[in-house]
Amino acid sequence: MPKKKINLLIVDDEEQFLKSMTKWLEVRGFNVIPVDRGEKAIEAARTQPIDIALVDLKMPGIDGEQTLKSLKEEHPWMEVVILTGHGSVDSAVECTKIGACSYLQKPCELDRLLSVLTDAYKKKVMNKMNIKEHRMDELLEVSQYGSPTAILEKIRELDQEEQA
Ligand SMILES: [Mg+2]
């Protein structure tokens, strides 16, 4: 089986930044999905499983905060990292409250970015396993009353669920 790449969604309205970031991260083995608007990011995440999103704050249309909020609501396992040129303590607090796992300021050292993305991915995988473990426990509780084929089918569903 081919190794699955980490799907990384990048949202930034600065075209040059988006291009160079995409190249830099692709070389490091990420499957990068670059988009230049929050609306497109939300759309892209609906059509393919995203592991991590790297989100700019100031963009035309819906801003980074709203994008973060929608992404987390629709895909609780996805981890979102904010990378902004217009950072502030207030906005960092707000984004963390909404569910961002990290908040970085531009210009950001690339090694630092890579380590933050690695942590984000680790968190995503752990969250997913915890949720599955929890669901499996529930399932096993229910299974005393269900038929064996129904239980088998439920476990199979759990195993084959989307990664998003
Ligand atoms: Mg911007």
Image (cartoon, grey):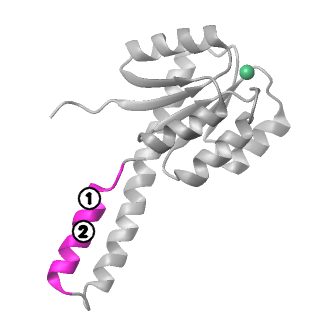
Residue at left offset 39%, top offset 23%: 30
User: Residue at the spot x=59%, y=33% of the render?
Assistant: 40
Left or right of 89 in this view: 57: left
Q: Residue furthest bottom?
A: 145
* Apparent side of residue 104 relative to residue 71 in the rendered image (left or right): right
Residue stretch in magenta:
147-162
**Mark 2 sits on what residue?**
155
Q: Amino acid at mark 2?
A: Ile
Do the CB atoms of the residues marked 1 and 2 lie less than 8 Å apart? Answer: yes
User: Is the residue indicated by label 1 positioned so its CB lies within 8 Å of ligand 1?
Assistant: no
At label 1, counting other C-alpha atoms closer than 10 Å, the crowd grade (few under 14, some 14-19, many 20 or more) is few
| Rendered image quadrant of residue 49 | top left
Pick the front one: 81 or 69: 69
* Residue at image point 64% right, 22% down: 12
Q: Amino acid at mark 1?
A: Asp
Residue at left offset 83%, top offset 35%:
89
Label 2: few (<14), some (14–19) or many (≥20) C-alpha neighbours in 10 Å: some
71 or 134: nearer the viewer: 71
* Residue 159 lies in the magenta stretch: yes
Rendering quadrant holding ligand 1: top right
Task: Label 1: state its secondary structure.
Answer: helix
- Residue 140 percent coordinates (x, y): 28, 79
Q: How far apart are labels 1 and 2 at the CA level? A: 6 Å
Location of residue 59 in the rendering, given as x and y in whole percent from the top left corner: 74, 26
Instruction: Assign the N terminus to one quadrant of the image.
Output: top left
Q: Residue 18: which quarter of the image?
A: top right
Q: Which residue is the site of mark 1? A: 159
Main SS of the magenta part reads helix
Q: Answer above or below: position of 155 versus 34.
A: below
Q: Secondary structure at mark 2?
A: helix
Mark 2 near ligand 1 (CB under 8 Å)? no
